[in-house]
Image (cartoon, rainbow, N blue to C red):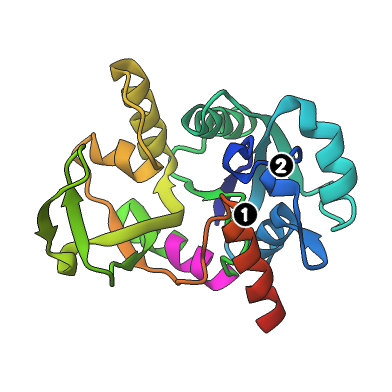
Amino acid sequence: MAIAIIVAGGKGVRMNNTMRKQYLPLAEHQVLGHTLLAFKESKKVNHIYLVVPKDDFAFCKDNVLFPLKLEDSISLVSGGPKRQDSVYKGLLAVHSVNADCDDSIVVIHDGVRPFVTGKQIDACINGANKYNACILGIPAVDTLKEVSSSGFIRSTIKREAIWLAQTPQAFKYSLIKRAHEHAKENGFQGTDDASLVEKLNVDVRIIKGSNRNIKITTKDDLSLARAMMVKC
């Protein structure tokens, strides 16, 4: 079994909306609601820690968890100033409840990736059980260019070995906690949790995710997500 940490503390600056992007409507639920339901479908996740801004606790309980009947099965955790801080606070919350969690698998996911499936979550957890660290991703299909600061192409990068990282990302608890603490001690800010583990020179397995597993960051992303919902 595994423990999930879902981070949903983004301010939605690029969305240019007064409401945080994780609470924006997407078909019959909010963006975050779809994400939570996917994790409830997982056969391997036995508890979810949802990391949101402290000021959002009441709103989240009343408008996201209660309508989905999830208020009793999800623990709310107060987020930090950056995503990395929020994940670490989630890790500390897990340990505060279960001090013997070192050998547990923790699966970390962005709350604004609502199209993840229970099967993908479980596959990622299975990978972490086997390799200690496993993430979802998709192979690059576009031509990749390295570009100078002045806007000129420096080189064309071979795409055969390039993958685009997604979440969920799953790790043995003791490993990911050590990776976060190592990053904190060295002032390193990664763009995902796998990059922190890589800093420990630990191998991370990547398995194929889906082009549908988009991250909703901009208005265009939200429009695409709503179109994808219509096609479902």
Which quadrant is home to the N terminus? bottom right
Residue at 62% across, 28% down = 79
Q: CA distance from mark 2 to mark 1?
A: 9 Å
Q: Position of residue 120 (x, y in %)?
A: 50, 69
Seen in the picture, residue 8 relative to 137 is either above or below; the reply is: above
* Neighbour tally class for label 2: few under 14, some 14-19, many 20 plus, Cα within 10 Å: few
Left or right of 196? Residue 13 is: right
Q: Amino acid at mark 1?
A: Lys
Q: Residue at x 56, y 50 (%)?
A: 217
Q: Is residue 219 visible?
A: yes
On the image, the x and y values in percent for residue 10 come to 61, 37
> Image quadrant for the C terminus?
bottom right
- Locate residue 39 relative to residue 1 in the image: left or right: right
x, y percent for residue 143: 22, 67
Residue marked by disc 1: 219
Q: Which residues are magenta?
A: 118-124
User: Residue 17 has which mark?
Assistant: 2
Which amino acid does the dot numbered 2 rest on? Asn
**Residue 186 falls in image quadrant:** top left
